[in-house]
Every structure is written in C-alpha cells, then in structure tokens.
Image: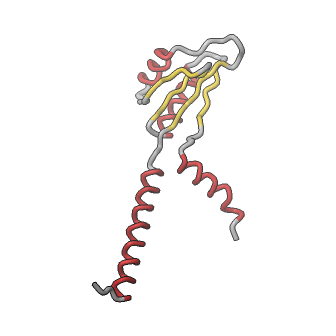
Amino acid sequence: MVINRHTLRWFSLGTGAVILLLLAVCLWVALQHNESTLAIRPSGQGASMPDGFFIWHHLDANGIRFKSITPKDDTLLIKFDSRAQSSAAKEVLDRSLPQGYIVAQLDDDTPASLWISRLRDNAHRLG
C-alpha cells in the first residue's frame, strides 16, 4: 500500500486537530468545576466547634443548598456546588453564629484552578 505525501499531511493535520479538540474539551470540563468550601473554626483555644445541625438549620432557613458538612480537626468544612452559594452562606453564618467563630472561604485546590491562578498571577510578566 502506497501512501502519498498529500494524504499523510492531511492525516497528520486531522490528528493534530482532534488532539487539540480533546485538550480543549478537557480544559473546559476542568474549568466547570465550581465546588467551593467554607471553613468554620473557633477563634480561641478551648472553644468548641458549632453544631452541624445549627449550621444546617440556618442555611436551610435561608434557602442555601450545600453538599456536605464535615468535621475535620477543630474545623467544620461545608462544601457547596458554587462559589455564589458559599458566599451567601458566609453572609448568613457571619450574622447567625455567636461571636468567637471564624468563617473563611477556602481556596479551590484543583489542578486546573492552580494553573489558572498561576497564569493570572504571571500574566503581567509576559512581554
């Protein structure tokens, strides 16, 4: 079987286009990951974590959906589907929790978000 240069060139261009398309789809899927996490911890030594049911009740009463509430060490982690839900929950919890608790937004540690943040931070250095 004889393959001429013209056919080989079109085959390599087509293969390259398919690879680029697959990379674009993978990047798009990675960027669609919008999960966000809030961390609640006591501000002082010896204080206890807030009750998960208390948190659930206040979020539910304000129509804020969450994925999970998980204790880890001396912190209560609340996972949300989006950053908007997490921000709304932070506002509610800042108002409803008694003094002595820190409610903080945790950074997303997915590989795609780490690369994007690196590119954003280094964009001013290009050129």
The image position of residue 26, as x and y in percent, is 43, 56
Q: Quadrant of the N terminus?
A: bottom left
For the residue pair 57 and 126, the one nearer the viewer reads as 126
Q: Say above or below: 93 vs 83.
A: above
Q: Residue 38 occupies which quadrant of the picture?
A: top right
The image position of residue 22, as x and y in percent, is 40, 62
Task: Give left or right: position of 38 versus 13.
Answer: right
Q: Quadrant of the C terminus?
A: bottom right
Q: Residue at x 59, y 34 (%)?
A: 105
State the colouring used for the structure image: secondary structure
Q: Residue at x 54, y 20 (%)?
A: 71
Q: Residue 102 occupies which quadrant of the picture?
A: top right
Q: Say above or below: 76 vs 83.
A: above
Q: Residue at x 38, y 88 (%)?
A: 5
Q: Say above or below: 121 vs 127.
A: above
Task: Give left or right: position of 18 versus 123.
Answer: left
The image position of residue 30, as x and y in percent, is 46, 50
